[in-house]
Amino acid sequence: MHSDMPAKRTIVYHGSKEALGPATDVILTRLGYRLVLPETFAQMQIEDPARLADLLVVDDRRLEEAEELHASQTGTDVPMVLLTGRGAVDSEDPRIVGAVRRPAGMHDLYRLIQQIFEDTPRSTPRIATQLAARFEKGDRSWEGRVLSLSENGCLIRSSESIALGQRFRLEFALPQRGPISLDAEAAYQLMPDLGLVFSAVAPAQRESIERFVTDTLLAA
């Protein structure tokens, strides 16, 4: 497991490296969810006896181990996500709040963690950017910038006023990945900027955006 920046959540991971998708632990740490191994967490508790885990991510083949090691967290019910090789998990244990198939990919695990912890969960990671953008509506076009980007939408600053609900064509270029051209709608304001949601994104362009976001997080 990796850590090189402050994290807002501590997640103790009981499982092998192979039970996670490539770089899943690294990217989740970049997003503020620090995955640590049980021995690392034990050392953290020695340094700070009041520290508790926020979540357990457990390969279901190591469930007994996880239960034993965290029995000392008396008075707390630490939520647990299982990594499973089976179909849907059928359990009456109230601590088990979700499950993901092994090997757990970053996007599946991120969506689930967001649902557990965040009041307004974001289904896909978002990164800060400074990408030149072009907007087109009918026979009009104008310039702006993409300030943050995810697979599903972005935050933009426009040289012209855009009404909420307005639909238009958005064009920008991703470094090393080339041009992106897609339909977008103004969904919310974050003064003085606008949040857009994408619609009908071609699979190849969606993959380009996803890879750009992932690569940027890994390079952070």
Image (tube, helix red, strand yellow):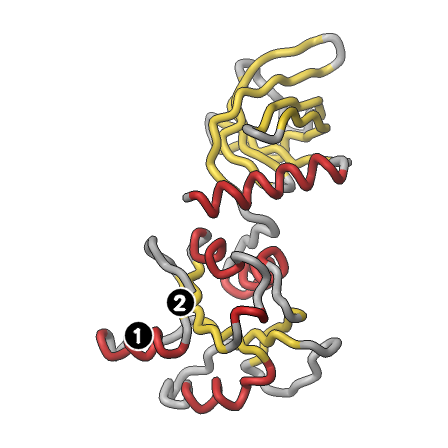
Which mark, by number, is residue 10? Answer: 2
Tell me if residue 3 comes above or below residue 130 in the rendering.
below
Q: Are marks 2 and 1 in contact (CB under 8 Å)?
A: yes
Tell me if residue 205 comes above or below residue 18 in the rendering.
above
The residue drawn where x is 67% and y is 70% is: 101
Measured Cα–Cα span from mark 2 to mark 1:
9 Å
The residue drawn where x is 33% and y is 55% is: 6
Q: Which sits earlier in the primary sequence, circle 2 or circle 1?
A: 2
The residue drawn where x is 61% and y is 31% is: 177
Tell me if residue 62 comes above or below residue 8 in the rendering.
below
Q: Label 1 sits on what residue type?
A: Arg
Q: Label 2 sits on what residue type?
A: Thr
Is label 2 in a helix, a strand or a loop? Answer: strand
Q: Give 42 or 71, whichever is nearer the viewer.
A: 42
**Image quarter of residue 96:** bottom right
Q: Give 26 or 113, whichever is nearer the viewer.
A: 26
User: Local crowd at mark 2 within 10 Å, few (<14), some, or many (≥20)?
Assistant: some
User: Local crowd at mark 1 within 10 Å, few (<14), some, or many (≥20)?
Assistant: some
The residue under label 1 is 51
Residue 65, given in percent of the width and then of the height, sits at 48, 88
Left or right of residue 208, residue 144 in this image: left
